[in-house]
Amino acid sequence: MAGNRFRYGQWNGGPDPLAPPYDVREAVDAVGAEVLAGGSLREALRDLLRRGPQGRGGLDDLAARARRLRREALRRGDLDGAVTRAQALLDQALAAERDELRGRDDDAARFAEAVLDNLPRSTARAVEELSGYQWASDDARRSYQQILDQLRDDVLGQRFAGLRDAVRASADPAAQQRLAEMMGDLNDLLARHGRAEDTTDAFAEFMRRHGDFFPEKPENVDELIDVLARRAAAGERLMNSLSERQRAELAGLMQQSLGDRLAGELSALDANLRALRPDLRWGRGERVRGDQPLDYADAAGALGEIGDLDDLLDQLDQEHPGATLDDVDVDAVARTLGRDAADDVRRLRDLERELRRQGWVSRDAEGLTLSPKALRRLGGTALRQVFAELTAGPRGQHDLRSAGAAGEVSGASRPWQYGDEQPLDVVRTLTRAVSRAGPTVPVQLVVDDFEVVETERRASAAVVLCVDLSYSMISQGRWGPMKQTALALAHLMETRFPQDVLQIVGFGREAMTLTQQELAAVEPDMEQGTNLQHALRLAGRHLRRHPDAEPIVLVVTDGEPTAHLDPDDGEALFHWPPLPETIEATVREVDRLSRYGATLNLFMLGDDPGLRRFVDAVARRSRGRMFTPDTDDLGEYVVSDYLRSRQSRR
């Protein structure tokens, strides 16, 4: 609009306004490529968020920054600085007092010197014994009082951030009285909250009276508890990080500096907070080292920062069941790692949400998994890769659009391609020629004018693909090609031959039926055993559910049968080398399938002589075929065999 004025300045952080949006489909394809290469589906989805899509910041980068900051915090300084400073002030006070006493010539001065000479070596106990001492030197008295005042201010200032702005916890009785009243009211509020009472009004009244101690301005009791509990846990970790002697010294000095009432209220507060937030690392200590002595506030601050970083690392690891990026505290990320890191988390969170919103991923009890929509895209990718590897034969290249040469006319036509056996659609062929060259006689035909009639088969097939899930499949690099083959075949049948029904059966020590989603997510079976008998039994069940369909069984394996189901209790029995009972049980299932009329084709991976003898015998017994493809050619062999079986049906 006319008259509008715009001001431009230097960009000061935040999301890059010129950064392109994440390509969600590209992210899905990256996950698919890892799965088809044999990787774990869940690991691939986690890696997408860990590495960050398109080379932009992921969770691993953020975690690395958090670990670096944690290492720096562990080298920040000496946690015993509060006791060291107290010892220095005590030595300063004693030196000034002795100088004053040497100038006096009376019995009281000699007695005072004897008291000073017999003080305990412990700083805390010496400070305690001097609590009633009548100082002769004003400088000495001030140094001694500084020990108590500084430690009290550090301890309470670390627990209540607004203390220094609200009131100093000095020797002023009125200030200590107000502080004690606030802590008493706070403990009462937390105790009521712990009993599940309604504390809404009580919290409002507490903040009205004591809100200046809490510049964070918590909006409810839970936020107040979170602020206080994290600081209390940091103080507890500080104590746990000291040696037993250092811990005793600091505890004694704190008791002296706070006095009985404040120390009692602080102890009660810690107990309330520990009960309300048991999840914090209360009992943990750290080995913080450094040359710089840290006072109590700085030492507790370093331990609190380490605790916050530990919590953040747990969130970034995303290892617990059901973990999502919504679990990551973006404010904590901004506080510890900076605004740009928080922006990275928001972008990753937006990507995860967009993947769910567009239907590419779904969430189950174990975390993210690919949705049926994404599996269709993954299956299409697998099928394209398989067809890209098919070699030209006498019938030309196999193609997704290829229709059966025999069957019912569908009423549609398509351009002719080399290798097609379908009849020509004469009307549409001449129409294309006339449209191209005009109404001339004779009509001149070129290759691009030809169209063939689309036909569809009425006969359907019940197909079972049995895939070996034993550990040797992944150890020999056959896991990825196996998944690619199964997903490609499933996609081909779903999109081009929907009248056929496919069942995928995976077998290790035992067999199980798998959906495409389960196949993509399946992990290698670490148990030994190749139970082909159980797989063929499940295959037979699928075939019997479709009695009007042509039965086809395809088996992909790299090992001879080493397991079978016990006929008595149904448990899987494993033995190597294969037992005669295992071979016999497997052959019985082969015979059942043969009597049912099933075609049994076996794809043997590897060159084990025992496997070759077994597969060859089964193929001959079932009047099927044996294939020995290279691992990279497995998909081509299986898909070609399926297409060949369809073309042979009439």
Image (spheres, grey):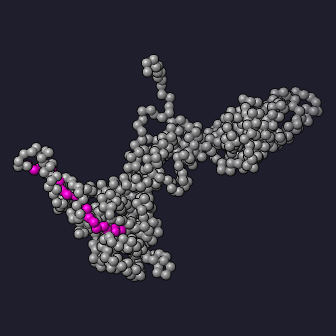
Residue placed most toward the observer, 95 or 515: 515
Is 605 displayed left or right of 440 in the figure? Answer: right
Give x and y (percent) for residue 153.
75, 34
Span highlighted in magenta in the image: 444-464
Give x and y (percent) for residue 263.
80, 42
Please identify the residue farthest to the left as the structure is shown: 442
Residue 327 visible within the image: yes
Please identify the residue farthest to the top as the structure is shown: 3
Give x and y (percent) for residue 183.
78, 39
* Quarter of the rendering containing residue 22: top left
Residue located at (50% from left, 33% from top): 14
Q: In which quadrant of the rendered image does the C terminus lie?
A: bottom left
Is 566 displayed left or right of 177 in the figure? Answer: left
Residue located at (16% from left, 60% from top): 423
529 above or below 46? below
Residue placed most toward the observer, 122 or 621: 621
* Quarter of the rendering containing residue 509: bottom left
Residue located at (47% from left, 75% from top): 572
Residue 235 visible within the image: no
345 above or below 604? above
623 above or below 271? below
Q: In which quadrant of the rendered image does the N terminus lie?
A: top left
Is 531 displayed left or right of 339 in the figure? Answer: left
Residue placed most toward the observer, 477 or 148: 477
575 drawn magenta: no
* Quarter of the rendering containing residue 562: bottom left
